Image (cartoon, rainbow, N blue to C red):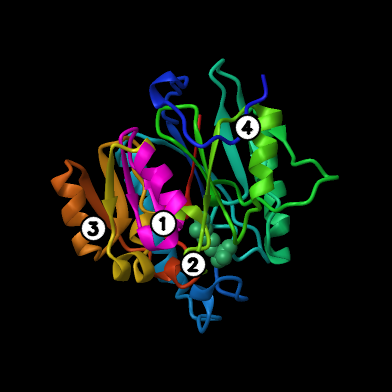
Amino acid sequence: MPTSPSASYDLASLPVIPLPGRVLLTSPEHFRVAYVINPHMEGNIGEVDHDRAQVQWSALRDTYERLGIEVSVIEGAQGLPDMVFCANQTLPYRTPGGERGVVLSRMYAHQRKPEVAHYAAFFEGEGYKVQALDTDLPGDFEGMGDALWHPGRYLLWGGYGYRTDRGVYERFADKLGFPVLPLRLTDPEFYHLDTCLCPLDEMTALIYPGAFDDEGLDLIRTHFERVIEAPEDEARSLFACNAHSPDGQHVLIQRGCTETNEKLREAGYEVIELDTDEFLKSGGSVFCMKLMFW
Ligand code: ARG
């Protein structure tokens, strides 16, 4: 039975999906700011300190390893300075029946389009069912920059408005059977859903409310029992909501999100502060530098 993007879902009735236990990273040797495709990149062309970026990326990799997450690394490719943001080129999924697949993105910016083939090859090697978007239908889609699985359930949060077109989610629902909750993004500095919504566990999300419309905020509050709000300055300049919890206990987050971290600790999470400021120059932090898969 095809399902359509719906106004709300009863979480308890949706199939349980195990948390992904593996993480994919892309090495940063070719990372730099070479063009401007989001407001954070403005003024930063040529400004990345390469050695610092390498150290910051290695610390992220070490953190996942320390937490017991199996790390795979794709080598960054010359001429693809944004490839290090490996959340964007695909959406891995696991069906309730246990099938592992991946939907390939159609990148919004022409500069990033060639990145996708590298990830398609990786997932082919992993035995995933690799699915491209229908070539005869329009619409961009930027993978796990905009499409986030609800932790532990078969439910997809679908951000749209800047990099991804809403219509793509309707096709996911019809063709792949994904239950999708679409969320409209309203502020160009929060151009991907992962810049303003971080699902921490099945019950809890960290959000920046100013990046959504009222309908979107309602959906978020309906489906997460507990919503932690990041203050505007931390969300905008430190990418507080681009944090990541791989296990529902630890939260990896850019250093210095003082108020957000206090709220996270109060809620029982163990905060791990990381330096990602070289990557912030390109409009990305922890969440976009990794891709979780099964
Ligand atoms: N410079 C990259 C871009 O604009 C940054 C991507 C960050 N990724 C993310 N999921 N927020 O595409």
Real-space CA distance between mark 2 and mark 4, rounded to the nearest whole angstrom: 26 Å
Marking on residue 136: none
Quarter of the picture holding the N terminus: top right
Q: Nearer the viewer, mark 2 or mark 3?
A: 2
Q: CA distance from mark 2 to mark 3?
A: 20 Å
| Sooner in the amino-acid sequence: mark 2 or mark 3 | 2
Q: Residues within 10 Å of mark 2 (few under 14, many from 20)?
A: some
Report if the CB atoms under discs 2 and 1 are less than 8 Å apart: yes
Whether tag 4 and tag 1 are in contact, CB under 8 A, the answer is: no
**Residue depicted at x 47% and y 19%:** 15
Instruction: Point out which mark residue 196 bears.
Output: 1
Q: Which segment is the magenta one?
A: 195-222
Q: Which residue is mark 3?
A: 260
The stretch drawn in magenta includes residue 205: yes
Outermost residue, bottom side: 43
Residue 181 in view (yes/no): yes
Crowding at mark 3 (Cα within 10 Å: few <14, some 14-19, many 20+):
many
Circle 2 SS class = loop
Residue 66: give x, y in percent of width and height: 30, 40
The answer to whether residue 209 is left or right of residue 263 is right
